[in-house]
């Protein structure tokens, strides 16, 4: 584990094995410097346990950085459950995972992520007090995440291209909980939308609702638009795609968009401004309340809106120092964690 390329001086990594409940999980706590480590739990049929470990290590580090730049009183962590959520998930498995979270004594606070929904969190919370507090009737974190991306897009269009959303063309890739909400906001503001999803029905629905043009998902980044918003999957900015991006700005919700730091540098060389994913997709985390504090929707929105200040300062610093935005964001986050 200590030799794993994604190991980044993580505070603690817990391997959970509960065969009677069908549970194999990894809880990676990256940092506790700013408070209890908060991060979602994702369930996926990883091909190998090494792949699951790498995912947990990478995602937990990103959570530390996200929480730090979001000025949240949380450290960073992530849990992964190995299994197919459509086949292997059971109440017993979820409760066993809850017991593992409880055993961490509050150092790890869990939440939903890919493959784990708010109902699953309810089952998990039967066995642990350490789940995050976000109002379920508000639709969970996705609407807050979408609002944060919308705020970031407005700021980036203004700062980079001196444009507003109205009349701008935007390619939205992925029309799930975040992408669809984002597309609705951009449409309401008068943007011209190009939409894509591997689920053709979702793309057609967006086309009807927002008068959008449907493009193939593999072509979403190649469009001659004012902004590309990847809201589907990670690694979308890689050695192949970066050279094909035509938009001057990339700003979307997908986690871990950069395949490597080389791609961060290549984007600068090509004059593309990348809005770091974990900075602008922090709306859900920013909306989250600390344990025991009642959820306040308006206070949550104000915290989400503060993404603009952080993003503008990253873009400004990157310009002044001729550095990639991803690197500038990482440096800022590490400095905050080090100070704590
Ligand atoms: P989701 O699962 O609801 O939606 C993802 C959408 O992407 C689905 O419609 C799916 O069909 C589509 N998709 C999958 N593969 C695709 C491909 N190859 N090409 C085009 N479309 C594809 O997820 P979400 O909650 O909307 O999150 C979107 C992204 O944002 C994810 O990467 C997620 O990790 C990240 N994110 C989400 C949140 C949140 O609050 N939900 C917070 C931070 C980051």
Image (cartoon, helix red, strand yellow):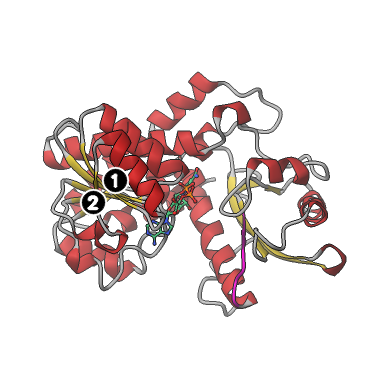
| Left/right of residue 63 with respect to residue 158 in the rendered view | right
Depth check: give the residue in front, 2 or 121: 121
Disc 2 crowd rating (10 Å Cα; few below 14, some 14-19, many 20+) is: some
* Residue 92 locus on image (x, y percent): 83, 55
Q: Residue furthest right?
A: 20
**In the rendered structure, which segment of residues is drawn in magenta?**
42-47
Direction from residue 17 to residue 139 in the image, left or right: left
Q: Which residue is mark 2?
A: 318
Residue found 76% across the figure and 52% down from its top? 101
- Tag 1 residue: 314
| 112 and 61: which is toward the camera | 112
Is the residue 158 above or below the residue 12 in the image?
above
- The residue at 78%/50% (across/down) is 98
Residue 83 percent coordinates (x, y): 67, 66
Q: Is residue 110 visible?
A: yes
Q: Are marks 1 and 2 in contact (CB under 8 Å)?
A: yes
- Residue at figure coordinates x 65%, y 59% from the top left: 85
């Amino acid at each position: 584990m200590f030799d794993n390329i994604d190991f980044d001086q993580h505070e603690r990594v817990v391997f959970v094995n509960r065969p009677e409940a069908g549970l194999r999980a990894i809880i990676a706590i990256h940092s506790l410097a700013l408070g209890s480590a908060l991060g979602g739990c994702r369930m996926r049929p990883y091909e190998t346990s090494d792949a699951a470990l790498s995912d947990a290590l990478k995602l937990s580090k990103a959570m530390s950085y996200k929480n730090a730049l979001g000025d949240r009183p949380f450290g960073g962590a992530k849990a992964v459950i190995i299994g197919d959520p459509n086949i292997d998930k059971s109440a017993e498995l979820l409760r066993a995972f809850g017991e593992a979270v409880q055993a961490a004594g509050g150092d790890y606070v869990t939440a939903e992520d890919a493959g784990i929904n708010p109902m699953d969190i309810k089952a998990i919370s039967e066995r642990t007090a350490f789940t995050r507090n976000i109002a379920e009737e508000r639709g969970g974190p996705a609407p807050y995440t979408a609002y944060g991306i919308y705020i970031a897009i407005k700021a980036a269009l203004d700062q980079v291209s001196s444009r507003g959303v109205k009349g701008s063309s935007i390619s939205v890739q992925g029309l799930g909980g975040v992408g669809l909400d984002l597309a609705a906001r951009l449409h309401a503001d008068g943007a011209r939308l190009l939409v894509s999803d591997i689920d053709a029905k979702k793309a057609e629905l967006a086309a009807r609702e927002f008068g959008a043009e449907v493009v193939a998902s593999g072509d979403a980044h190649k469009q001659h638009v004012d902004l590309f918003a990847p809201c589907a999957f990670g690694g979308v900015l890689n050695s192949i795609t970066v050279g094909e991006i035509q938009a001057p700005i990339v700003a979307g919700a997908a986690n871990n968009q950069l395949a490597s730091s080389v791609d961060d540098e290549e984007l600068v060389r090509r004059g593309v401004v990348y809005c770091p994913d974990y900075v602008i997709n922090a709306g859900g985390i920013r909306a989250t309340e600390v344990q025991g504090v009642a959820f306040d929707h308006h206070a949550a929105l104000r915290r989400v809106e503060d993404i603009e200040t952080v993003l503008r300062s990253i873009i400004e610093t990157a310009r002044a120092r001729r550095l990639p935005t991803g690197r500038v964001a990482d440096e800022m986050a590490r400095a905050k964690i080090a100070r704590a």
